[in-house]
Amino acid sequence: MERRQFLRQAGATLAVASTAGLAACAQQPAKTTVSSGSHPSPDAMSLAPIRASVDRITGVYVCTRPFRAAGPRIEMQKLGSKTIVHNYGHGGSGWSLSWGSGTLALQMAQSTGARELGVIGCGAIGLTTALLAQQAGLAVRIYAKALPPDVFSMHASGLWTPDSRICDAEHAAALADRWEMMTRISYARYQSLLGLPGKPIEWIDGYSLADAPFGSFHGEVPDEPEYGDFADRVRDLTPRSVELSPGTHPFPEPYVRRYTTLMFNISSYANLLMSEYLAAGGKIEIREFTHPDELQKLPERTLVNATGYGARALFNDESVIPVRGQTARLVPQPEVNYGLRMKDISVVPRSDGIMVQVIGDAGNFNNPDVTPRRADSEAAVRELADLMTKLRRS
């Protein structure tokens, strides 16, 4: 999740929504302010400290988010004897939009009359699309050069970010209706996954910290485009952010907002999806494709292309731009159940490790380099450690 997404959401609650058939909740004010005369929030004042030190880093990970200026490519293409349903280019929204995007792709695949489906790729989009096809009664085989945990989707931060680098501002109007449909379908499915063993999906609170009033500073990454912003379209079930006055929170910064969002514990969530797919008879073949002609040899007549950034090389689609992202994972702390957004870093308290992400850096757009820069992550962890030393205790 990029810096612009953090800063935009600091001023408004994260965009989440119900499925189209659910009744909308009554609209709430855009934010709630805890006045200076209020008592401190017991939850905020008793936050467990994060043990942030470089020796507790268990791994540094890099992914390339597949951005397309026009948004995800979800469309059919006839290629020789095959029908290809493309489903890629979701930027930083792959996990968040996977169920809605997969639903649209499956509808296209079903329109061919196919009863067997091949899915190319086993990341967030491919695996979810394969599960949806199974549930619709199709026989499914996944073809992939790597499986979880060795796919880029596993390196995501793990937050619900349905419009993170989803398109540029110029194409936002054309994408808006389709984006809203995908968002509502996905959100409804995630509600059905709450409360399961291993907590694959859960709600968390977090705190945005700033030195200046929210909305008074410019949060653009200088070498990236202006991205589409769809948050206002899906506010009907969105928990509202709460502005906390000094004395009602433990942070040293003068401006603090508490937000609520969905979090994906990606390790347990991906394991759940893989287990369900295999238990239902799903097949997997480890295979890498370097040219579209190789797809003609597959037995399935209808295929879903869910290769993400890999579609740039496989289908010569230069509209797919890699956006580099790096996270570090700290040793898990079950008692830490809150997220953080600071100027240069974000923190996600996943069960498989506390994720510390460097945000806002230039040089990531159109950068395919997946070499981890450990020094950057160590600097972010030290910044987090400095914050922890300044927390006030109740």
Image (cartoon, rainbow, N blue to C red):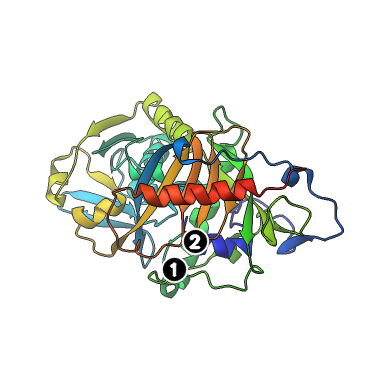
Label 2's element? helix
Inspect the image, locate mark 1, and give the three-letter code of the amino acid beneath it.
Answer: Val
Label 1's element? loop
Give the position of the C terminus as an image quadrant: top right
Residue denoted by label 1: 221
Other-residue count near label 2 (Cα within 10 Å), few / some / many at <14 / 14–19 / ≥20: many
Q: Which mark is residue 3?
A: 2
| Viewer-closest of 113 and 28 | 28
Percent of width and height locating residue 371: 29, 49
Direction from residue 139 to residue 131 in the image, left or right: right
Indicate the quadrant where residue 319 lies: bottom left
| Viewer-closest of 394 and 166 | 394
Direction from residue 50 to residue 96 in the image, left or right: left
Q: Which residue is drawn at 44% across and 66% down?
A: 175
Other-residue count near label 1 (Cα within 10 Å), few / some / many at <14 / 14–19 / ≥20: some
Percent of width and height locating residue 341: 57, 55
For residue 187, say whether it is visible: no
